[in-house]
Image (spheres, rainbow, N blue to C red):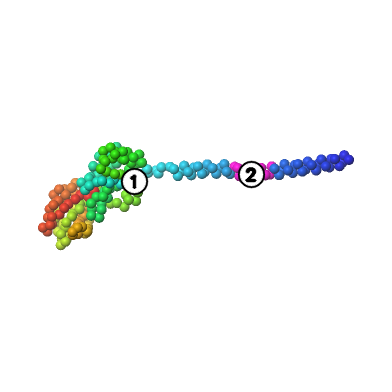
Amino acid sequence: MNVLRNAAKSHRLIRIGGHRNQGLSSLLRESPRRFSTETEQPSKDSSSDAFLQTPSTGLVYGKLFGITKHTTKSDIVNLLEGCEVSLDDIKVDYAKSFAPSGMMIQFPSRFAYDAAIRAIGRKGRLYRLDRADRSQWDLMTSYDGKAVLLQGIPRTAVPDDIERFLSGCTFDASTMQIFVRQAFPDSIRMAIIHFPTKAQAMHAFMTKNRGFCLNTQILVRVLQ
């Protein structure tokens, strides 16, 4: 009888030990999943933080509306005093007729852009500043005050006639572009000519504006 009791007791211990081993195996199988869940979470947070980081350049672009053909870059720099904007940070947006439709402005940061909004609200209510895209800035030409626009060139005028009109001025004849723009009632013939410096372009404006080319009066404008 003792032999039978000992055999039955051994059988129960084996079954209990088997259940314990199965439980331990199950725990070990589940543990890696818990550990992997805990290690995945930080990488998700770090990627989210990287997404929210400010770009290293911090540049912000805006387009200023409400300017006229008499508005200069210097006027806008003075208007936005304290907003970290220089003459090189402004480009004039010209329509096909070369009437200025606005100015693109490059700000060094969002804080500078917000400061410009406040400055316009205080002392420049005739203007409106809207956010713009970097691509608009990149596609825009900056004449930088070193080019002049001649308007009203006679249809029969050739480049030599235009050079004679500008006699006494220092300019680069190879940059001359002659074109026609539609207007009412007649189209207007124009030309753009580049000068080595801003002073020389301004000299051409002061000495040649409303002068005559083949008995036709020519309007001269400095392009910014």
Q: Which of 129 and 31 is in front in this view?
A: 129
Q: Mark 1 points at which residue?
A: 131
Residue 8 in the image, given as x and y percentages of width and height: 83, 42
Q: Is residue 33 magenta?
A: yes
Judged by depth in the image, the label closer to the viewer, 2 or 1, is 1
2 and 1 marks in contact (CB < 8 Å): no
Residue wearing tag 2: 30
User: Is 145 covered by the magenta stretch?
Assistant: no
Percent from the top left, x then y, of residue 174?
21, 57
Q: Would you say 184 lies left or right of 121 here?
A: left
Q: Residue at x 54, y 42 (%)?
A: 41
Is residue 81 in view from this perspective? Answer: no
> Quarter-wise, where is residue 118 in the image?
top left
User: Distance between the Cα atoms at labels 2 and 1?
Assistant: 53 Å
Identify which residue is drawn at 23% across, 55% down: 97
- Residue at 29 percent across and 41 percent down: it is 85
What residue appears at the point 13 percent right and 49 percent down from the top-left corner? 207
Residue type, label 2: Glu
Q: Position of residue 117 (x, y in %)?
A: 31, 40
The reply, left or right, for residue 118 in relation to residue 150 is: right
Left or right: residue 33 versus residue 12 is: left
Magenta stretch in the rendered image: 24-35
